[in-house]
Amino acid sequence: SSKITSILNPADITKALEQCAAGFHHTAFFKASGLSKKSDAELAEIFNVLDGDQSGYIEVEELKNFLKCFSDGARVLNDKETSNFLAAGDSDGDHKIGVDEFKSMAKMT
């Protein structure tokens, strides 16, 4: 998404995606992509891209396609990666990730 590449360095995104080839871990991705260094406002903008249906939450299907938001050619997350990602970010137990939860995840790296 051009919105994402206006916030994150495309080379950092590429590096982060390459690291995910063997397995996805959100903290490694957030750090490598530069997400962990972004402001709340920038993280909110990225969250809005990730929230494909604009529900205000990133749900399971959107989590599966998380990497594809950064590059069309990226893979989907497998079920285990998706459930681990959800468990790490879903602090209130509603089975989805809100914008504040997303910001917290990014800053925990």
Image (spheres, rainbow, N blue to C red):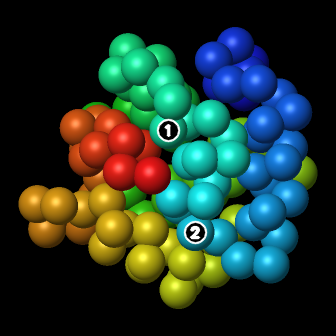
- Packing grade of label 1 (10 A; few <14, some 14-19, many >=20) is many
Extreme residue in the left direction: 92
Question: In terms of depth relative to the viewer, which is nearer, 45 or 42?
Answer: 42
Residue contact between numbered discs 2 and 1, judged by CB atoms under 8 Å: no
Residue 55 visible to an observer of this rendering: no
- Indicate the quadrant containing the N terminus: top left, top right, bottom left or bottom right: top right
Residue 30 visible to an observer of this rendering: yes
How many marks are shown on the rendered structure? Answer: 2
Q: Is residue 10 left or right of residue 27?
A: right
Q: Is residue 15 left or right of residue 103?
A: right
Looking at the picture, which amino acid does disc 2 mark?
A: His
Residue 39 place in picture, x, y as percent: 41, 19
User: On the image, which quarter does residue 9 sit in?
Assistant: top right
Residue at 71% across, 77% down: 23
Q: Is residue 85 left or right of residue 28?
A: left
Secondary structure, mark 1, is helix
- Packing grade of label 2 (10 A; few <14, some 14-19, many >=20) is some
Q: Earlier in the sequence, mark 2 or mark 1?
A: 2
Can you tell which mark lies on residue 25? 2
Q: CA distance from mark 2 to mark 1?
A: 13 Å
Extreme residue in the bottom direction: 80
Looking at the picture, which amino acid does disc 1 mark?
A: Ser
Q: Is residue 35 left or right of residue 104?
A: right
Q: Nearer the viewer, mark 2 or mark 1?
A: 1
Residue 81 place in picture, x, y as percent: 55, 78
Is residue 7 positioned above or below 93 on the image? above
Secondary structure, mark 2, is loop
Residue at 65% across, 70% down: 24
Can you tell which mark lies on residue 36? 1
Can you tell which mark lies on residue 18? none
Residue 99 place in picture, x, y as percent: 29, 36
